[in-house]
Amino acid sequence: METFLNYIEFLCDLLVIDMPEVQYKKGTKFYNQFGKPVAPFKLRSTAGGVTYHEKRMVRIDLNKFKDLSIVYQVLAHELRHIFQCDVIANEEGFKGEVDPQTIEAWRKNMDDYLNSKDAGHENQPIELDATAFSYVVCMTILHAPIKFSCDAEKLAPLVYDMTQNYTESEILECAKEFGIQPRRILA
């Protein structure tokens, strides 16, 4: 039973957030990141992973991924959404880490959020930010091309900013603390 626990711990440490509940569906089993059973759930057909902001919970349907390496990308993306929620809920605690204009854009976006079945979903501010974070982390750790469906021109400056906030050496050092070895994570 794959729980990705070390990877989740690494991401939470890198983001400086408390670990949320992460739930998985695999086959007919439902469990959390500690391998404990959870209530069955069903995600929208257009979503492999979903963040429930109000519950600080992530749900991932592993059955939707032929290649489990994509789950690392999804986890980074969804945990970045938890970070965004934490920032909005506690702006003062993240002062200097995220600029006020970004926080306001995230807040407005969450109020008018388009879900995965809606056109333009992937180009919303919170989705672009989460994709940029996932891209930087996964390229650093997995050394593999990352698939994304958002506008590359909108994503590029966010990826650059993300590399300034999370340097390669910081990501690798943090990963090492949790026993994550680049490129071998998929072995």
Image (cartoon, helix red, strand yellow):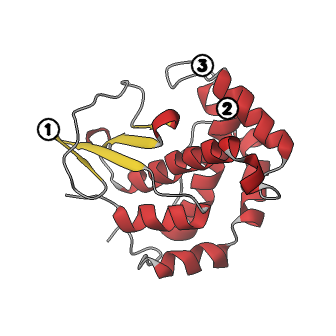
Q: Which residue is mark 2?
A: 123
Q: Residue at x 68, y 31 (%)?
A: 124
- Rounded to the nearest whole Å, what is the CA distance between mark 2 and mark 3? 9 Å
* Amino acid type of the residue that numbered disc 3 sits on in the rendered structure: Ala
- Using residue 142 as the reference point, say whether residue 155 is left or right of it: right
Q: Secondary structure at mark 1?
A: loop
* Residue 20 image point, x, y percent: 44, 51
Is 104 in front, or is 115? 104
Q: Secondary structure at mark 3?
A: loop
Marked residue nearer the N-terminal end (2 or 1): 1
* Residue 77 image point, x, y percent: 53, 48
* Amino acid type of the residue that numbered disc 2 sits on in the rendered structure: Asn
- Rounded to the nearest whole Å, what is the CA distance between mark 2 and mark 1? 33 Å
Q: Which residue is mark 1?
A: 28
- Using residue 53 as the reference point, say whether residue 150 is left or right of it: right
Q: Is residue 120 above or below residue 81?
A: above
Q: Is residue 102 above or below residue 182?
A: above
